[in-house]
Image (tube, helix red, strand yellow):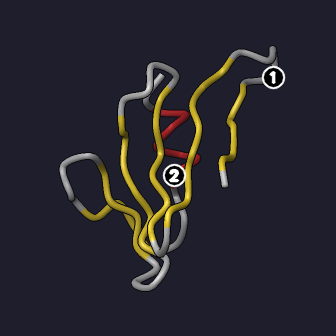
Amino acid sequence: MRQVFKDRDGRLLGWSDRAGARTTGRDENGRMVGWYDIVRNETRDQNGRLVGHGDLLAALISSAT
């Protein structure tokens, strides 16, 4: 399932797609900014570094623009 993120002016910031136990976040150009592991309840950036616990993809996507 895809979730789209837009700013208050309606400009596309990015989106997230869920596949199995992983949700991947992408910026407006389609570059992966990170992923959320549902089983571990961890969000990691594109380099695999732990960002935090819980789904923090919206924060990664909005900070990528």
Relative image position of residue 64 (x, y in whole percent): 43, 29
Q: Are marks 1 and 2 in contact (CB under 8 Å)?
A: no
Residue occupying the point 81% across, 22% down: 8
Position above or below: 45 against 64: below
Residue located farthest toward the bottom when viewing the structure as drawn: 39
Relative to the observer, which residue lies in front, 31 or 9?
31
Q: Secondary structure at mark 1?
A: loop
Q: Which residue is mark 1?
A: 8
**Amino acid identity at mark 2:** Leu
Count of residue discs: 2
Quadrant location, the N terminus:
bottom right
Disc 1 marks a residue whose amino acid type is: Arg
Q: Would you call the spot at circle 2 few (<14 residues within 10 Å), some (14-19), or many (20 or more)?
A: many
Q: Position of residue 36 (x, y in %)?
A: 44, 64
Residue at 45% across, 19% down: 29
Q: Position of residue 39 (x, y in %)?
A: 45, 85
Looking at the image, is 60 positioned above or below residue 38? above
Q: Quadrant of residue 49?
A: bottom left
Disc 2 secondary structure class:
helix
For marks 1 and 2 on the same chain, the one whose residue lies earlier in the sequence: 1
User: What residue would you read off at disc 2?
Assistant: 57
Q: Residue 43, image x and y in percent?
A: 40, 64
The crowding category of the residue bearing disc 1, from other C-alpha atoms within 10 Å (few below 14, some 14 to 19, many at least 20), is: few
* Distance (Cα) linking label 1 and label 2: 18 Å
